[in-house]
């Protein structure tokens, strides 16, 4: 009888936790993770550089005049003037003047960059990559209740998903069995109809999260909830308060609800609802080739799906699952478990292609010789430290008493 009573008490306790909010009133501090900051910072200006590269390649001559690029600075999200940005990457872009009178500066890709672009184009046209991309895009749509998203939301994740810059024309028509363009049923601020992308039919084989794939049990889909714990990786120096640790441990033991299920029936402020919310964000980041994205992108998706402030709270409450980096002039949410220090644990093949662009970006000319910009910055820092130490030594010697 005592055992039965204890079992019933435990069951009632878990049912209550699914309906009530038990998060403790404690501040979860933010602690910098230098490794994940490095992972974010290494891609500084990559998105802008690839946008400019695509603009140059799409020009009929593949060498547009600089004056036609300069006004597009906001659209390309360039951090400085177009000319200065181009000059910062001499192994990617080259400026020249055509051999005609009064000609203006033109821009083209260097042979190395053009060769890399051709390799990228070949990769993007591989059938297995395009199928992988179609499935990841389908899974993104399946995270929504209506299986559709407006293009303004999808475009926020276009770079992080690895979609071609012209995916509407070069990619979507290839998968009529997956997608169709639809009206979203509302208008934008200018009164224009909003269009989006819709999944033709639900794909049960894709409705398995990366967390479920990583769990070896086979009782998914049998109607029984399983208890899956998220990987928690806190940086050195991060120490949760004891009451937060206790709450997190109990929260981890709550049943796992797939992000592909509709759990909006749960009390929005309950612990169980938060575990489902964390699952949605976790799956979203897992679909992205770099396992990270700008915080505003996540907020935009959450607002459209009806999560509102719940996405914001989930990111703050679980620093062991998600990391917020404030590098490269923005805020980036990183999936911690996807990285070993600053290295992706599993590199998507398309990320390997992007790392080749980063390698070109990091090369600079010094006295006409190409060197790695990272190595140059390291030597300059060492020289700066050495000069500072030398200055301090001179100051110390100047105040030492002189012998008579």
Image (cartoon, helix red, strand yellow):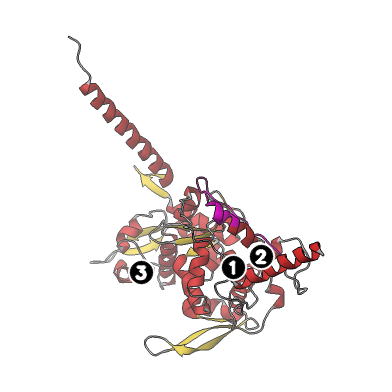
Identify the secondary structure beneath mark 2.
loop
335, 377: nearer the viewer? 335
**Is 236 covered by the magenta stretch?**
yes
Residue 347 visible here: no
361, 186: nearer the viewer? 186
**Residue placed at 62% from the left, 77% from the top?**
263
Query: Which residue is denoted by mark 2 in the rendering?
Result: 254
Q: Is 271 drawn above or below residue 372 in the view shown?
A: below
Tell us which disc is closer to us: 3 or 2: 2
Q: What is the residue that sits farthest to the left in this orientation?
A: 404
**Residue placed at 75% from the left, 73% from the top?**
221
The segment highlighted magenta reads 227-246
Quarter holding residue 271: bottom right
Q: What is the residue that sits farthest to the top in this orientation?
A: 404
In the drawing, what numbered circle is on residue 213? none
Query: Which residue is denoted by mark 1 in the rendering?
Result: 271
27, 185: nearer the viewer? 27
233, 79: nearer the viewer? 233
Give the image location of residue 169, x and y in percent: 52, 80
Contact check, label 2 and label 1, Cβ < 8 Å: yes
Tell us which disc is closer to us: 1 or 3: 1
**Is 68 covered by the magenta stretch?**
no
Query: Which residue is denoted by mark 3 in the rendering?
Result: 64
Upstream in sequence: badge 3 or badge 2: 3
Contact check, label 3 and label 2, Cβ < 8 Å: no
Q: CA distance from mark 2 to mark 1?
A: 8 Å
Quarter holding residue 201: bottom right
Quarter holding residue 383: top left
Identify the secondary structure beneath mark 1.
helix
Q: Residues within 10 Å of mark 1 (few under 14, many from 20)?
A: many
Give the image location of residue 206, x and y in percent: 68, 73
Upstream in sequence: badge 1 or badge 3: 3
């Amino acid at each position: 009888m005592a055992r039965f009573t204890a079992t019933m008490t435990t069951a009632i306790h878990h049912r209550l936790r699914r309906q009530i909010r038990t998060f403790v009133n404690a501040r979860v501090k933010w602690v910098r993770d230098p490794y994940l900051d490095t992972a974010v910072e290494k891609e500084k200006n990559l998105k802008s550089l690839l946008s400019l590269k695509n603009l140059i390649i799409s020009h009929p001559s593949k060498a547009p005049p600089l004056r036609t690029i300069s006004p597009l600075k906001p659209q390309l999200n360039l951090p400085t003037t177009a000319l200065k940005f181009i000059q910062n990457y001499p192994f990617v872009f080259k400026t020249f003047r055509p051999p005609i009178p009064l000609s203006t500066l033109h821009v083209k890709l260097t042979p190395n960059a053009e060769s890399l672009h051709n390799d990228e184009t070949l990769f993007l046209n591989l059938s297995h990559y395009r199928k992988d991309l179609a499935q990841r895009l389908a899974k993104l749509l399946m995270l929504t209740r209506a299986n559709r998203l407006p293009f303004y939301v999808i475009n926020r994740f276009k770079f992080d998903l690895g979609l071609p810059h012209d995916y509407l024309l070069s990619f979507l028509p290839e998968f009529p069995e997956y997608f169709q363009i639809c009206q979203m049923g509302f208008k934008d601020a200018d009164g224009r109809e909003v269009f989006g992308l819709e999944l033709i039919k639900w794909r049960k084989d894709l409705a398995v999260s990366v967390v479920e794939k990583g769990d070896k049990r086979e009782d998914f889909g049998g109607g029984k909830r399983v208890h899956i714990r998220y990987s928690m990786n806190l940086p050195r120096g991060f120490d949760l308060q004891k009451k937060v640790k206790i709450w997190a441990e109990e929260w981890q033991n709550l049943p796992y609800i797939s992000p592909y299920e509709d759990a909006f029936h749960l009390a929005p402020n309950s612990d169980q609802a938060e575990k489902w919310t964390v699952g949605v964000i976790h799956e979203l980041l897992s679909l992205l080739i770099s396992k990270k994205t700008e915080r505003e992108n996540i907020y935009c998706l959450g607002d459209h799906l009806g999560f509102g402030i719940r996405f914001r709270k989930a990111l703050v409450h679980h620093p062991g699952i998600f990391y917020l980096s404030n590098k490269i002039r923005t805020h980036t949410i990183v999936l911690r478990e996807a990285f070993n220090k600053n290295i992706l644990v599993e590199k998507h093949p398309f990320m390997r292609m992007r790392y080749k662009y980063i390698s070109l970006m990091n090369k600079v000319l010094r006295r006409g010789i190409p060197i790695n910009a990272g190595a140059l910055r390291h030597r300059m820092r060492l020289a700066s430290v050495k000069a500072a130490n030398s200055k301090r030594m001179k100051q110390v010697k100047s105040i030492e008493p002189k012998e008579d």
